[in-house]
Image (cartoon, rainbow, N blue to C red):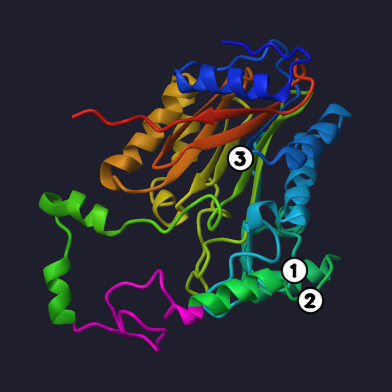
């Protein structure tokens, strides 16, 4: 189903977009290229990417401009500096960029003191034979390549959030099987004898999945995941995030993991993901989506299939993905929350936001 991009009030755009996706139809673009697709209503990020790719620059250039705009705007407080403090009150950056023509990937994870995540990821791709650099050494590399730093990535808002969390006895947190249960540590492992009782088996797997309920919401754990098809039909993807709020220091989520937060192959299409990265990265959902499309699945079916694989094991997980094939057909799927993704294509006068509602399971 195509969406007519006439000069309509913005509420009409949202209504049409909601109806076509909520009732299970894919969206086809009459003019295929260029195309920009992004998680969430990060409108300025999509506009920045669109201006770049519509001017004739590459999909890679557009990914950098789009994700950089989100980092500068601190989208939802979950991208760029100044958000998502870890247990020590520090903000760190995860980012990734992938070239769907060459299959090259550049990524940084748990990067300290440098706010330009997507630019740092591209520098890893351009100036190393590696795929990912992590931690303070990623910062040293990025600064040596000319990015600004070192910089304190915390903000008044993030520090205030961290102080209130500490006052609440560091709850909620991402610890398990540790003591103290309702305190800020120092933590120690529970008696290993007692842990035997909590081992998950095939017979009680779903109950275990429910116990591992997520702390994720759009405002404390989010990723911009963006896909761009340029005028040559080349596809690239990129991501940037400051990770999960109150994460254990050193934690790396799905943001910088190719195949999990995003994946691209110009011969097939692309995918972007957001949500509980600790769970989603175990399934490589975006790799699954692209490979399913390679085997003939339409984007909507590929997205739903990938999400359902996770939900079968973790029924309480929260996450979402968008899928777009090389012909510009796009769709989304989600579980545990209502998801929105943004699109700009040649037949649209501005960014259109599509709303996906989770399917209610039937028993």
Q: Residues within 10 Å of mark 3 (few under 14, many from 20)?
A: many
Q: Residues within 10 Å of mark 1 (few under 14, many from 20)?
A: many
3D distance between C-alphas at marks 2 and 3: 30 Å
Query: Marks 2 and 1: in contact by CB < 8 Å?
Result: yes
* Position above or below: 207 against 136: above
**Secondary structure of the magenta portion, mostly?**
loop
Closer to us: 277 or 285: 277
Give the labeled residue for mark 1: 114
Which quadrant: the C terminus? top left
Please state the horizontal and vertical placement of residue 92, each as a whole percent of the image: 63, 68
Q: Which disc number belongs to residue 40?
A: 3
* Residue at point 27%, 31% (across, down): 361
* Position above or below: 147 against 107: below
Q: Tell whether 341 sits left or right of 349.
A: left
Please state the horizontal and vertical placement of residue 121, each as a whole percent of the image: 70, 56
Residue 50, located in which quarter of the rendered image? top right
* Residue range of the region highlighted in magenta in the rendering: 166-191
Give the labeled residue for mark 2: 150
* Residue at point 44%, 41% (across, down): 337
Mark 1 secondary-structure assignment: loop
Residue 188 among those drawn in magenta: yes
């Amino acid at each position: 189903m195509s969406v007519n991009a006439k000069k309509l009030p913005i509420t009409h755009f949202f209504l049409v977009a909601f109806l076509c996706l909520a009732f299970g139809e894919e969206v086809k673009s009459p003019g295929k290229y260029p195309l920009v697709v992004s998680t969430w209503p990060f409108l300025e990020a999509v506009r920045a990417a669109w201006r770049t790719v519509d001017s004739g620059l590459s999909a890679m250039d557009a990914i950098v401009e789009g994700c950089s705009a989100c980092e500068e705007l601190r989208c939802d407080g979950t991208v760029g500096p100044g958000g998502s403090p870890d247990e020590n009150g520090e903000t760190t950056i995860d980012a990734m960029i992938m070239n769907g023509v060459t299959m090259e990937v550049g990524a940084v994870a748990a990067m300290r003191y440098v706010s330009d995540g997507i630019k740092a990821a591209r520098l890893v791709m351009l100036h190393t034979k590696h795929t990912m650099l992590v931690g303070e050494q990623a910062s040293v590399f990025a600064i040596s390549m000319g990015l600004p730093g070192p910089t304190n990535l915390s903000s008044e808002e993030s520090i205030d959030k961290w102080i209130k969390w500490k006052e609440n006895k560091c709850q909620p947190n991402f610890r398990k099987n540790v003591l103290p249960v309702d305190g800020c540590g120092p933590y120690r492992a529970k008696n290993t004898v007692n842990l035997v009782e909590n081992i998950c088996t095939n017979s009680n797997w779903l109950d275990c999945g429910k116990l591992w309920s997520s702390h994720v919401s759009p405002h404390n754990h989010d990723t911009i995941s963006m896909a761009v098809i340029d005028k040559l039909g080349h596809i690239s993807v990129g991501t940037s995030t400051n990770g999960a709020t109150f994460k254990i220091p050193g934690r790396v989520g799905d943001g910088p993991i190719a195949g999990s937060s995003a994946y691209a192959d110009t011969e097939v299409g692309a995918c972007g993901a957001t949500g509980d990265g600790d769970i989603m990265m175990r399934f490589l959902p975006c790799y699954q989506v692209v490979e399913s499309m390679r085997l003939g699945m339409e984007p909507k079916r590929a997205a739903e299939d990938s999400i359902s694989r996770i939900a079968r094991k973790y029924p309480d997980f929260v996450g979402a993905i968008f899928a777009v094939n090389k012909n510009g057909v796009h769709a989304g799927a989600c579980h545990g929350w209502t998801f929105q993704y943004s699109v700009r294509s040649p037949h649209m006068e501005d960014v259109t936001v599509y709303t996906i509602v989770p399917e209610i399971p039937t028993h």
